[in-house]
Amino acid sequence: MPPLRHTVSSRRILRADPQRVMALIADPTTWPRWQPEVFEARGLSPVQRGSVIDGRARMLGFDVTAHSTVTEATRSLMEQDVVVGVGMRVRYRLSVAPGGCVLEHRIEADLPRGLSGRVLSLLLRPRLRRMQRRMLDNLADGFSGA
């Protein structure tokens, strides 16, 4: 039986050149500055398809080992398979907009079925939504006035 899948997605207009934004996203050493849950990330920069990033993150109040494998990396798209206690697919897509760019962000989390999956879902869903909002706010703030 396949796992339950929970998806959160959002978009934000950033006042920056899309290439500058992607350069930041593709540099794991910057992740702790703008990703609220990440406090350590190690990997080659810029990432490319197949890159592996290891580090530490905080998920639901626990410090966990984090592991990411980049499945796609272009000038406008980065996708990765992430494990931070649960398996997730994370996507960043950039498109040009007047005065900057639009960043679309999506997280797909696979949760176990049954009672444990339902309990985890109740805890994880609002946390992922808040994490995504803070991450987009941090990125937007980092480029405001740039």
Image (tube, rainbow, N blue to C red):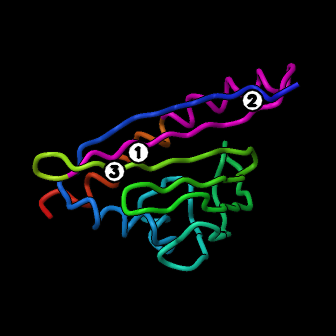
> Mark 2 = which residue?
120
Is residue 22 depicted above or below 102 in this figure?
below
Identify which residue, 88 or 85, lies in the foreground: 88
**In this view, the mark in front (3 or 1):** 3
User: Label for residue 134?
Assistant: 1
Q: In this view, does 146 lie to the left or right of 123?
A: left
Gap between marks 2 and 3 measured at Cα: 31 Å
- Tell me the quarter of the picture where residue 50 sits: bottom right
Query: What amino acid does circle 2 point to?
Result: Leu
Query: What amino acid does circle 1 point to?
Result: Arg
Question: Of the residues under marks 3 and 1, which one precedes in the sequence?
Answer: 3
Residue 87 horizontal/vertical position (percent): 73, 45
- Is disc 3 placed on a helix, strand or loop? strand
Within 10 Å of disc 3 (Cα), the crowding (few <14, some 14-19, many 20+) is: many
Residue 16 horizontal/vertical position (percent): 20, 59
Question: Which quadrant would the N terminus be assigned to in this image?
Answer: top right
Q: Is residue 100 left or right of residue 136?
A: left
